[in-house]
Image: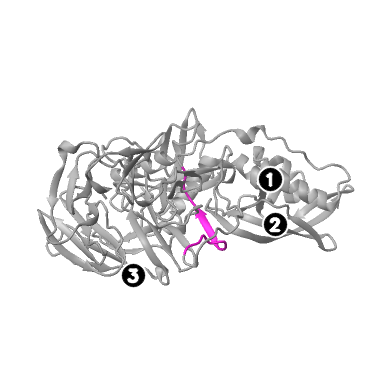
Amino acid sequence: MAKLSRLTVITVSSVALLALNACAGIPTSGSVNHYADPRATASSTSESIEIDGPAGGASPEEIIRGFLNAGVGVRDDYKVAREFLTDDYAQSWAPDDHTVVYSDQPSITNSSGDSYKVSVPATSEIDDRGIATSFNANETKNLEFELKRVDGNWRISSAPGEIVLQQNQFDQVYNPFTLYFFDPTYSYAVPDVRWFADRDTVATSLIRVLLQGPAPYLKDAVVSAVPEGTKLTRNSVPVDGGTADIDISGDGISNNLSQLTIERINAQMNETLTSLANINSVKLLLNGQAVQTGTLSEVNPIVDPSVPDSVIGTEDGSLVTRSQIDDPASQSTVYTPQGANATLPAMGIARGIYSYLSEDRKNMWLVRNGEAQQILTGNDLSQPSFDYLHWAWVAHDNSTISVVSSTAENPEPEDLEVPWLNGYSVHSINISRGGSRAVLTGTDGTYSYVWVSGVIRGKDGKPIGLQEPVRIGTSIIPDYADFTSDQEIVVANYEEGTAEIVSLSGISRSLEPLKGLTKLTVGGGDNQIMAETKDSTLYRLTSSGWTRVESSMHDFNYSG
């Protein structure tokens, strides 16, 4: 599937199957979920859209098509679209339940009498929580309409509570907006993007769905500071002078809320709404009463945590580190295996803890205090990934995901229960800097996939599972994927030497192909992407493309 431009940010274009072998392909059926994007700023493009109302003497089919086309006019609560409805129905029609996006024209047939069926070849849809799903192949949505004559003209008396938009219309009026939740320690902000029409009421929509909780793939992986069951006291979030007034109430909202909880609620809502162009602060009210915020320090979560410049790599089979890739004077040997070469090294977030694999990828070693301990034996081990709670993650033996506490006195690997991976072979797994999400690549033997899954942990921070994932669309056959930020993923295909950076909303940027590509490694952002080829040549991604790096070190990796 291919993401071609901003115009197709959440759709999946129909593409011919690439010339692939039986074990490597891109799925052409099923759905792809897109759920994040760089912090969106509401635009006013929808305000300038002009739509025609119903013409006198228009046929039922013309009225229906005119009504569908008027869905692009979000101004004044779809004022023009309501002109195609009977007066009574115009008062009750609620268009925010669902949005269907199409590329090919819908067909309209007369079912019987004044009843009509509209068959929409949907490419994507957005539910009432703003969660977007794209389809690899068109899925037909059948919508039922009832019409009646009013003063000699046809009007719609019954229609689905849905907006139906052509792809270019969708692009004009919808934007991705980021909600924020917390990791279980309340240290990191975790993005969760939803799609909404660019209306004056978008702040209300964002807070409404924020109060409902995270998207399914993040359930049990993130937390909200807002007590369960909380609702808006009034059905709007008014904005005045750049300040959004958010009045919430519910069983969990009382005068007994701790100041820490209040500050966290405020931080979560502030982080969510201040990405909008017309909002620079929020005012929090509980049951109609304004509360004081800003009295506690260090309550704001870290957004898109940075990655240190320090790296680990190999030289002549030994594990070596540098404070920066291009600083050979800082190079230090941390461990030299006896009678074997280290490969695919990893470094803990706090350094001082390292891991590597044997050359046949059958054994994983943990290095602490200059000593190595073999901790896992299996087949086709993936390069380990450390999270900020010092758990090392590795995939092996097709679909097994194992974790080990790198700081435990006697570290022992444990297998996670991940039933949704049954039948797949996992190529790579990497954990986000905030520790709440994993990105995996794998295959079912026919097609290859990129998934993002919420990391489920116990109260002690121990990983206990991976949530049902969302599948990320990519135009290449993925062997490897890792987070370049909390909003973007780099995906690589080693056989073809291709790579691309995919925004989690579906926008992609292809990187210059590298012949003989064998490894990609990622720190944070585009300036911390390194590549290595079969002849052991190293490259760093720069604004002008891949730039060769002269170094005696190889097999680079950043911490994490």
Q: Is residue 454 left or right of residue 326?
A: right
The x, y position of residue 388, in whole percent, is: 25, 51
Mark earlier in primary sequence (2, 3):
2
Give the residue number, with chain letter if any, for mark 3.
417
Judging from the image, what secondary structure is the residue with disc 2 in? strand
Q: Is residue 428 left or right of residue 179?
A: left
Mark earlier in primary sequence (1, 3):
1
The x, y position of residue 122, in whole percent, is: 65, 56
Q: Quote the CA–CA distance across marks 1 and 2.
A: 14 Å
Q: Residues within 10 Å of mark 3 (few under 14, many from 20)?
A: few
Do we see residue 234 in this rendering?
Answer: no
- In magenta segment, residue 29: yes
Do we see residue 430 in this rendering?
Answer: yes
**Amino acid carrying mark 3 in the image:** Glu
Give the residue number, with chain letter if any, for mark 2.
120
Q: Residue at x 68, y 40 (%)?
A: 73
Q: Which mark is residue 71?
A: 1
